Amino acid sequence: MALYTLGFNHLTAPLAVREQLAFQPEIVPAALTDLARRQPVHEAAILSTCNRTEVYLNTEQPDSAMQWLADYRHLTRHELEPYLYTYPEHDAIRHAFRVASGLDSMVLGEPQILGQMKEAARFAEEAGTLGTTLHKLFQFSFAVAKEVRTTTAIGNHSVSMASAAVRLAERIFERLADQKILFIGAGEMVELCARHFAAQQPRQMVIANRTVERGQSLAQRIGAIAIRLEEISERLAQFDIVVSCTASPLPILGLGVVERAIKARRHRPMFMVDLAVPRDIEVEVGEMDDVFLYTVDDLGQIVKSGLESRQAAVLDAEAIIDERVAAFLNWLSTRGTVPVIRSLRDATERIRRHEVEHAMKRLAKGDDPAQVIDDLSHRLTNKFLHAPTQALNQPGDDHDLLPALVERLFRLHPDNRPSN
């Protein structure tokens, strides 16, 4: 068994490719079950965000998992390979730690990825594909992320998609306080954007969500009102700014709906931000003269300009990660000895129980307790040392290696050997 990570991210694959490979949260457990059933994998977890789709594996055959990914998303390996990265054990561990710490994110140091990794681990646990090794990998990753965030400046001078969206809107509208804003979805990213826009005290904020109760809950927290998702088409013309981020596999806003809204607005401009992968707003909408449409990749380019203050912290973070990678590799190396240790303990426990039972019978017959204890200690010593003594006295190909090995196992110092 060995650890591998294979996947695609914002650095290796354009948005058009990433949205084909995205896994909506509700299908991840079923996908993991399918992967475990079809391919020779011992453990698996899927991390799918707007910036990446990655499969964390414990397997001897990572190529088979890539074939599964292609088949599951109805693509060919030829279509995937130009964008794919595959990391073996050491690199897979380091990559997981960097992802959790925000070093591999489009926005350096962003904290949302940590929650998404925790969700990936939870989905794997629900699907029954989170074994000891991946569980330990994720727990290490979360601990490393916490250490990086608390001991370096990687999270200082916050730069986010949400703040970038506000800055872009300010370039288009003279005063955000005069604008009406529609948020589609009620997840974490929408809430972050809503809080950033709320700080500008817009004229109105509306939350449209498929689950009305969740939309109302978010609306109450940010001072907005909630509507049903089905109401968007008839009310879209009312809004100057639209921010969307849902898990819908199909677009929420099509070209026709937006065209009618722009016509009803008499061609007053509309600013739209689509943070979803797959996209919530049809690509063609961005070609309209009166619509300013920005995708997650567009905002990613914008936020890069505000990252200089975090770059100095990267070296500190990388040093922490390197240390923790070594620690995890050490843990992995000990995993192979676990069955041997368990067998050794089981064998010695059987000897102990047998000798204690023998001693108790002697005590019950009235034998001298001091003699029984002395005999018990000698019998235990002889039985524990029988196998290693026998091995040392028998010739064999490895006989010359055994004395040094026994000295190491029993912590014997050569100077303390009895003289002849």
Image (cartoon, rainbow, N blue to C red):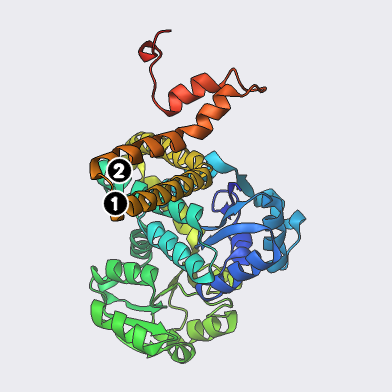
- The residue shown at (40%, 38%) is 379
Name the residue furthest top: 420
Q: How crowded is mark 1: few (under 14 residues within 10 Å), some or many (20 or more)?
A: some
Q: Which of the numbered marks, if any, corresponds to residue 418?
A: none
> What kind of residue is marked 1?
Leu
Task: Tell how many labels.
Answer: 2
Q: Which of the numbered marks, if any, corresponds to residue 363?
A: 1
Q: Is the residue 20 above or below the residue 235 in the image? A: above
Q: Where is residue 276 in the image (x, y as percent from the top left)?
A: 50, 69
Q: How crowded is mark 2: few (under 14 residues within 10 Å), some or many (20 or more)?
A: some
Mark 2 or mark 1: name the one nearer the start of the chain.
1
Q: Name the residue under label 2.
A: 372
- The residue shown at (41%, 62%) is 118
Indicate the quadrant containing the C terminus: top left, top right, bottom left or bottom right: top left
Q: What is the quadrant of residue 222 in the picture?
A: bottom left
- The residue shown at (49%, 42%) is 332
Is residue 76 shown left or right of residue 11?
right
Q: Is the residue 51 above or below the residue 230 in the image? A: above
- The residue shown at (26%, 75%) is 202
Q: Is mark 1 on a helix, strand or loop?
A: helix
Q: Nearer the viewer, residue 388 or 179?
A: 388
Q: Which of 29 and 76 is in front in this view?
A: 29
Say whether marks 2 and 1 touch (CB < 8 Å).
Answer: yes
Q: Which of 140 and 163 is in front in this view?
A: 140
Q: Where is residue 258 in the image (x, y as percent from the top left)?
A: 52, 81
> Is residue 176 visible in the rendered structure shown here?
yes
Q: Where is residue 392 in the image (x, y as percent from the top left)?
A: 55, 23
> Is residue 102 visible in the rendered structure shown here?
no
> What kind of residue is marked 2?
Val
Mark 2 → mark 1, Cα distance in angstroms? 7 Å
